[in-house]
Image (cartoon, rainbow, N blue to C red):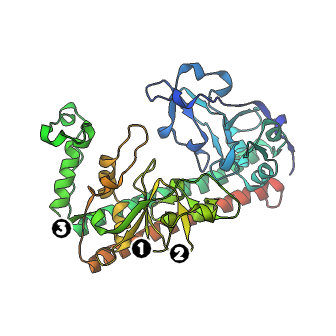
Amino acid sequence: MDNAVFMREVITEGAYGVLPPGDSYDQSLPIAFLRATELRPNLQIDLKFCHQVAREYMIRKARVHVGDVLLAVKGATIASPKCVAVIEKDIGETVINGSIFRMQFKPHVLPKFAAVVLDTPILKRQMRLSLIANNGVDYLDKALINSLIFPVPVEATQRKVIDVYELASSRFQLAQIRAKQLQADIDDYLLTELGINLPSEPENTIVNRIFTAQRRELAGWRFDPYYFNIQFHALEHAVEAGSYSTVSISRLFLSMNNGIDCRDFVEDGVPYVKVADVRAFEISPDKAQKVPVTAVPERGIVRKGQLLLTRKGSFGIAALVDHNDSYAISSEVFRIELDNNKVSGEYLVTLLNSKLCQSQFDREKIGAIMGSLTQAALSRIHIPLPPLMKQKNIAEFASSIRLQSKQLVAEAENELEIAKHRIEAMLLGEVEI
């Protein structure tokens, strides 16, 4: 690379963040606490899910400023698609945690250019080669960051690199927006096919937040006001007034059980699928940790055709097992055997992931800090049940829309990766700028 230097020659300030104890978070506190989990692809961050901490953690080394470049330095986020972010505008009083390294660059290095370079394959390869293990977790320490080989072309070239990246990034973001619109179209399609007219959400006024409940409704049952909110009663009435009779989803199960709790991870064993490995319509056993075969009883093994439903943390996420490889599931995931004479698995999983059921899950969850679902709660989730042929038609249409959405995002992701490789070639002098 022309004009390449060690990163220590262009960094004016670099430091890790703070590590407040887990019981110090409270959403009423004034300082946003940015973790690696809030970093997003394409150099973005998402502050919506940040914890809040006390002002005592607003120390100089951890405070975020405009022009900062943030680099994830711990575990699986290292050199991942969301390992880098750049602070281009004021985001308020925010600190980073210890798994992020915060950098400021010398004036002749544009912050956005620095972030783009750190997001290219050539810098990520260097990061992976430089990893060290800390208590079994990979780590990128300050000395190794400082020793990364970093290209520093003239400002005009830096701006051209930024332009190439931003063009591909903007197209990717537009593809994601369009994909979300398509997903929303599935929900609208479902409601139309099932003859359900959901009431519009009421304005967030004091009058609309006040409601009453009969004492007999509360006796021996839920006492939290949220459960009895009028929006849920309106949802119930809308579902019951639809074109098809409703049924508790538990009536569609031949069997249901939680998975197993196992922490004895090994190199050669059975994939152990946890909540993080289950996404709407998709399961990722290939990325899961492994546990010994001898540690997994029959109830913890999942097989093709069964339904997985997350029950804790990110609860209510459903996916069908669509391949023959067996694997284990954690105790925070339900394993469900469906009665295929009553329900199409593809129809049910489409409905469970729709706003129709997600709203019901939200109502039925328990736990103030980390929501969770119980087997009893599932018996109170009701869905419309049209004839099997109608179910299959609905599922096929929804599946075609999801496929279109995935292809849209995949094409944009591919274009972005091509742009990153082009930037790398520009920096290496392999293509004309």
Camera-nearest residue between 7 and 221: 221
Which of disc 2 and disc 1 is earlier in sequence? 2
Q: Quadrant of residue 148?
A: top right
Give left or right: position of 36 versus 137: left
Residue located beneath label 2 in the image: 323
Residue 45 is situated, as x and y percent measured from the top left of the image, at 56, 42
Element class at badge 2:
loop
Element class at badge 1:
helix
Which of disc 1 and disc 3 is earlier in sequence? 3
Q: Is residue 199 visible?
A: no
Q: Which label was assigned to residue 245?
A: 3
Q: Tell which tag, 3 or 1, sits nearer the viewer.
A: 3
> Residue at coordinates 66% horizontally, 31% vertically from top-left?
17
Q: Is residue 54 visible?
A: yes
Specify the farthest residue to the bottom: 389
What is the C-alpha distance between the residues marked 3 and 2? Answer: 32 Å
Q: Quadrant of residue 33?
A: top right
